[in-house]
Amino acid sequence: MTTAEEASLLGAVDSQHIAFGLNQGRVIYTSDSDFLRIHDADIEHHGIVYCHQQKQSIGKIIRGLELIWEALESDEMRNEVEYI
């Protein structure tokens, strides 16, 4: 796991996050619905996990991320969205 801060992407535009994810082979976890629009626009991404802000507890989010990590291979997440 890498945070936006660790990747020097704090304040970066969404396309930079998408490019980082593609380049690094990483799925993006977000509560920013703009990433759902990116997906709907058929812009290539390595995968998006979306959770509406303040809808779930931290524990449920972590369990959801663990379940996705255990159940899906990297290539199965490519250009897909999973919801928590």
Image (cartoon, helix red, strand yellow):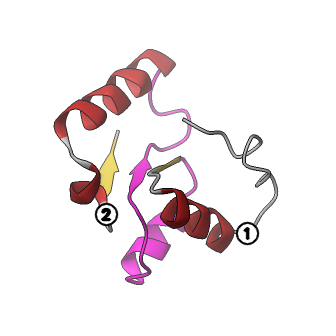
Q: Nearer the viewer, residue 10 or 58?
A: 10
**Which residue is labeled 2 in the image?**
78
Describe residue 5's horizontal placement relative to residue 58 as left or right: right
Percent across and percent down for residue 83 are: 33, 46
- In which quadrant of the rendered image does the C terminus lie? top left
Circle 2 crowding by C-alpha within 10 Å: few under 14, some 14–19, many from 20: some
Looking at the image, do the residues carrying marks 1 and 2 touch, with CB atoms under 8 Å apart?
no
SS at circle 2: loop
Percent across and percent down for residue 49 are: 40, 48
Q: Residue most toward the left?
A: 71
User: Is 54 a magenta residue?
Assistant: yes
User: Is 74 a magenta residue?
Assistant: no
Quarter of the image for residue 23 reads: bottom right
First to last magenta residue range: 30-57
Q: Nearer the viewer, residue 31 or 22?
A: 22
Describe residue 64's horizontal placement relative to residue 28 as left or right: left
- 1 or 2: mark nearer the eye: 2
Residue type at mark 2 is Arg
Residue at x-position 58% and y-position 55%? 32
Describe residue 67's horizontal placement relative to residue 60 as left or right: left
Residue at x-position 22% and y-position 47%? 73
The mark found on residue 13 in the picture is: 1
Residue at x-position 20% and y-position 44%? 72
Percent across and percent down for residue 36 are: 44, 66
The mark found on residue 64 in the picture is: none
